[in-house]
Image (tube, grey):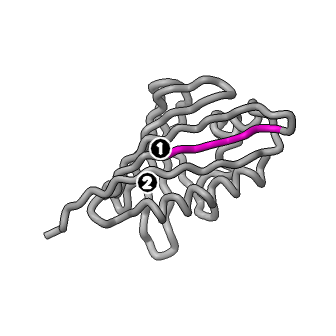
Amino acid sequence: MTQRSAMHDTFRIERHFDAAPARVFRAFADPEAKAKWFGGPLPMKRELFDFREGGREATEATLDNGTTFGYTATYTDIVPDERIVYTYEMSMNGQRISVSVATIELRATATGTDFAITEQGVYLDGLDNSAQRKQGTEELMDALAKTL
């Protein structure tokens, strides 16, 4: 029998990008731009991309060992070039491992964009944790920076 648990945590990552807020925003809003950085080294299978309030996004990636990871998001609040709020769940081999609320904030500066992502998550049944998620998000932000 599976030991059920729910661990809650919040993390925040801040970056400065040498790109205008519109360009950073487009990296999330445009499916071709997002495909260049989202998912890191894993080949992603995009099943759905509907970037609008109430819209959904779904992707899946399979590791060499056959483990499959799923990502399903719902966009809740979108302010072009300023803010994106969405909820998302992650699954592993079809089992939900976490549910999160993420807020992306973009602020124009003289040299580009101050960027922040805050994630409030619940990590389920010991299958995921905040430290792993933060590390993965840091790696995604590194990949995003390279595309900007």
Question: Magenta segment, principal secondary structure?
Answer: strand
> For the residue marked with disc 2, what is the amino acid?
Gly
Task: Indicate the position of residue 22 as horizontal and vertical percent values.
Answer: 75, 30
Numbered range of the magenta stretch = 112-118
How far apart marks 2 and 1 lie (CA) works out to: 7 Å
Task: Indicate the position of residue 114 as horizontal and vertical percent values.
Answer: 72, 40
Residue 116 part of the magenta-drawn span = yes
**Residue at screen point 75% across, 51% down:** 145
Task: Indicate the position of residue 112 as horizontal and vertical percent values.
Answer: 82, 38
Secondary element at tag 1: strand
Asked if marks 2 and 1 touch (Cβ < 8 Å), the reply is yes
Identify whether 117 is placed above or below 43: above
Identify whether 104 is placed above or below 11: above
Res. 136 in view: yes
**Residue at screen point 53% across, 44% down:** 118
Identify whether 37 is placed above or below 107: below
Residue 117 part of the magenta-drawn span = yes
In this rendered view, identify the residue nearer to me: 38 or 59: 38
> For the residue marked with disc 1, what is the amino acid?
Ala
In this rendered view, identify the residue nearer to me: 113 or 91: 113
Q: Which residue is mark 2?
A: 70
